[in-house]
Amino acid sequence: MSFLPTPIQKHPTTAKGRSPESQFWKRYKHPVFIKNYSPVTSIHFAPTEPHRYAVTSAMRVQVLAPRTQKVAKTITRFNDVARSGHIRHDGKLLVAGDDSGLIQETTQLLSCSDDTTVKLWDIPSQSAVTTFTEHTDYVRSGVMSNLNPSLILTGSYDSTVRLFDARTGAAEMVMGSAEKGQAPVEDVMLFPSDTLALSSSGPILRVWDLVAGGRCLRALSNHQKTITCMAFNGNASRLLTGGLDQMVKVYDVSSYRVVHTMRYSAPILCLAMSPDDTHLAAGMSDGTLSVRRRNTSEEEAQAAATRKEVSRTGDFESMLERIGEPEYLSQRPVTKPKGDPDEVKLAKEHKKKLAEYDKLLKEFKYGEALDAVLVPGTSAVTFFSLLQELVYREGLRIALSGRDDVLLEPVLQMLSKYITDTRWGPLACEVAGVLLDVYSSVVGLSTVIDHELAQLRGRVQAELRLQKDVCQLRGALDMLLCSAVLSTA
């Protein structure tokens, strides 16, 4: 019978950072930090390629190229602090305002003001088409419907979210209230279908059902401080929120569960994601603009090119006529020849090479096998798996005996390091007991070994104090829970 190698123990590991969702968001690497002299208050990506983005900070709006992060244009014609630089859907015009009330560069736009009004402007006639005055405090966020430009969703510091209709000139729906203890609304968004709305007030993210008359579907509290901004990914399947707690949370909109979290160096004021999901930009209160880039795979690039061609031609059939018959349609499926159905194929066995410590165990050299797993670079899993194998073989005492202070020191260091680890604590205690039994007669003859034994004793005493405190805390919690149950009974 062949020699069986030492079984390496496998311990359960947490799934944090290992899910496909986390792996996707961790691909946003190579952050580029662009320092500004004032807080970055707004970021907006152009819907059309090459998806340039507008960054609003201080008294200027800069348009940057996503690939090179170079400034393509700088707009400084502002009399005060610039606000809300947005690029039009065709990528050719930009709209921005400032604290003096000036609005620049577009044809028709929506403005929300600190004077509590919301206005829909017609720039060619230089006049306000509609003015809404229902809000009673600063209006810091607003968005127009993608499907019906007459519908406008706004959020105000009066803690309300209102849906206005430009055709009637009034608010058709009011969501939230300061009387219910809700915080001022910092940002609002509409889903592409215009059936659901999102609002952030304080650390709470709320989902409103517009079809059901503005009923609150969800109230999510995953931030520790105020949520200042929200953004969708390219297909609106993920929602990103940024807050003053320096965190960006990624939600799955199908379940509103947080699937990933990113930490930044300063409170986040604005957040944006490119339509092709390749760039993630965040503006912070210290004036830093952080841009993270994700490298796309060949399959994603090919799929993006196909979607672009389909959108340009209008349908899939015209695309086929333009580029010719695809290769996969012209090729016939190739069938592999089948052999005799009664033929039996024997698989060739490939013997695995034994590790050095397994070779020594095979020769019953227990002490040398233990030395083989004490070399630098060997994992703790391998070390304790070998100790467990020595216990099964009743060779632990043999492996520990006959060692001088040089060979005994690394064993004591490993035991001292992992004796409080829940995975290997019981085994480490057993090995430490055998080691003290073997070398009890020579304790005190080596300063190196005495120091390591003192370290081991200190770790054990600290763990005992910790377990005592945990037991006291558990008793106190049991008393509180019991008193709470009795008071409600």
Image (cartoon, rainbow, N blue to C red):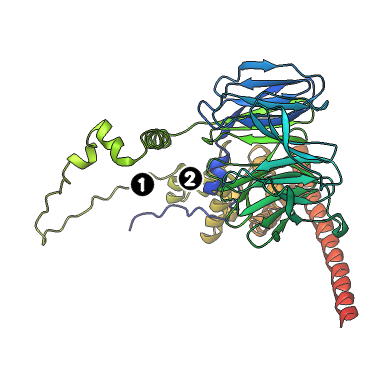
Give 429 or 95, whichever is nearer the viewer.
Answer: 95
- 108 sits to left or right of 221: left
Q: Nearer the viewer, mark 1 or mark 2?
A: 1
- Which residue ends up furthest to the left in the rendered image? 340
Tag of residue 163:
none
Circle 2 packing at 10 Å, graded few (<14), some (14-19), many (20+), is many
**Tag 1 secondary structure:** loop
Q: Quadrant of residue 309?
A: top left
Give 140 or 251, whichever is nearer the viewer.
Answer: 140
Residue drawn where x is 88% and y is 75% of the image: 484
What amino acid is at disc 2? Answer: Tyr
- Which residue ends up furthest to the front in the rendered image? 125
- Which residue ends up furthest to the bottom in the rendered image? 489
Q: Is residue 161 above or below residue 298?
A: below
Mark 1 lies on residue: 352
Residue drawn where x is 23% and y is 33% of the image: 324
Q: Tell me if I can see residue 243 in this picture.
A: no
Tag of residue 357:
2
What amino acid is at disc 1? Answer: Lys
Give 219 or 100, whichever is nearer the viewer.
Answer: 100
Q: Tell me if I can see residue 195 in this picture.
A: yes
**Tag 2 secondary structure:** helix
Q: Position of residue 483 (x, y in %)?
A: 90, 76
Residue drawn where x is 17% and y is 46% of the image: 333
Q: Position of residue 40 (x, y in %)?
A: 74, 28
Q: Position of residue 90 (x, y in %)?
A: 54, 29
Circle 1 packing at 10 Å, graded few (<14), some (14-19), many (20+), is few
- Work out how far the residue at label 1 is from the one at label 2, CA to CA, in angstroms: 14 Å
